[in-house]
Image: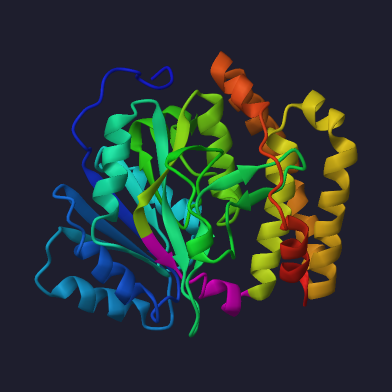
Amino acid sequence: MSGPDRGGAAAPPSVTAVVVAWDDAADVGACLAALDAQDHPALDVVVVDNGSTDGTADVVAAALAGPLRHPARLHRHDRNLGLCAAVNAVLAGPTGAAVLLVNPDAVLAPDCARRLAEVLAAHPDCGSVQPRLLRPADGGPDRIDTTGHLRTRLRLVLNRGQGRPAAAHAPPAGEVDGVSGAAVLHRRAMLDDVARHDGGRTEWLTEDLVAYFEDVELDLRARLRGWTARYAPEAVGRHARAGRARRRPRGVHVLNVANHLLVTIGHEPPRALARDLPLVLPVLVLRLVAAAVRRPAAVPAVLRRLRLLPRAIRRGRADRARATPAGRAALAAFSPLPDGWLGDAVRRARP
C-alpha cells in the first residue's frame, strides 16, 4: 500500500481486540468483561498469556469459559516474549480491519470500540484513534490518564492532560500527535503499510523495544507514511496504570529511559536532531540522572541496551526513505510544552 486511501467514508470496520497479559491476574478479568460487553457488532477478542506465573491463565480461562457476546480465543506462551513480540504473533494471522490494543489494566466503556471504529470509517487517512482515558482516583475525582500524545521539540512525548482533573480537561475531537498504547484502535491497513519485512519475517511493532515507547515509534512511522492520528472524546476508558510499574520497577526504568534514547536518536532526521541538540541533550541527560537516583542499578542496564542503537538508526533511515511529502512535514512539526509540565516531570522523577 502507498500510504492512506483517501476515498470516502465507509462502514465501521470489524475489530480484533488484543490483550497481552503478563502476571495480570488482578486486572485482566475486568478488562475482558468490558471487552465482551462492547456493543460493536463485528468484534472478536484475542488474549495472549505471556508466560504468566500468578494465575493469570486461570482468570482468562474462566472469563472465556462462559457464554460470550463476542468470539474470543487464548494464545499461551511459555515465557514472556515482551509486548511487541506477543502482538506481532497475533498480527501474523488474520484479524479484523482494525486492531484494538488494550492493556490488561484498562477497562473500556461498552460503546468505546464502536465509537473508535466510527472515527476510522469517517476519516480514511486516519491510522489510529485515541479514546479518552481516565485514571481512577481513590476517593477523589477522576483524573486524566491521556487524551493523546504531545510530541515536543525537546523530544519529550507527553500524555496530553495527564494528571489533570477530568472535569478541567476536555479537548475537542481532532488530530493529535500520536496515541497511547494503553488503549488504541489501529487501522490494520496502516499497520501493514508501516510493517518491516526482513528475511521472510514481518515486524509490526519493533521487538527491540520490548514494551515501552513502541507506541511512540509506531506514531512516527505512521506519520512518515502520511497517516494521521485522532482523538475521540466520546470513546471513554479507564486505565489504572497499575501492575508492572509496581512489580517490575527496575525493568520499567530501564526500558523507559533506554527506549526513549533509541527512538529519539534512531528515528529523528540527523540534521533536525543536531539543530535541536542544545534542547534535547539536557533532557536525555536528566532522564539518565533521574533513573540513577531512583534505581541506581538501572543505569548499567540502560547503557547495555544502547548496543541496539546502530540497528535503531538503520531502521529509522529506512523508514524515512519511505516517507511521503506530507509525512516529512508532519515529522518536522512539534506541539508546545503544556503549562506545568516541568513540575509534573519533577514529581514523577522523585524516588
93 left or right of 316 in image: left
Residue 166 against residue 325 in the figure, above or below: below
Tell me what residue is drawn at x 66 percent, y 38 percent. 335
- Can you name the residue that lies furthest to the left here? 67
Please state, as top left, top right, bottom left or bottom right, where the C terminus lies in the image.
Answer: bottom right
Tell me what residue is drawn at x 52 percent, y 56 percent. 169
Tell me what residue is drawn at x 34 percent, y 36 percent. 188
Looking at the picture, how far across and down is residue 331, in whole percent? 64, 28
Q: Is residue 240 magenta?
A: yes
Is the image coloured rainbow, by chain, by secondary structure, or in one colour?
Answer: rainbow
Please state, as top left, top right, bottom left or bottom right, where the N terminus lies in the image.
Answer: top left
Does residue 230 appear in the picture of this structure?
yes
- Can you name the residue that lies furthest to the front here? 168
User: How many marks are shown on the rendered structure?
Assistant: 0
Looking at the picture, how far across and down is residue 118, in whole percent? 26, 40
Residue 327 against residue 90 in the figure, above or below: above
134 left or right of 7 in image: right
Q: Is residue 310 magenta?
A: no
* Residue sitting nearer the eye, 230 or 224: 230
281 left or right of 116 in image: right
Q: Identify the magenta region.
A: 237-248
Tell me what residue is drawn at x 33 percent, y 45 percent. 99
* Residue sitting nearer the eye, 170 or 298: 170
The quarter of the picture where residue 9 lies is top left
Looking at the picture, how far across and down is residue 44, in whole percent? 20, 53
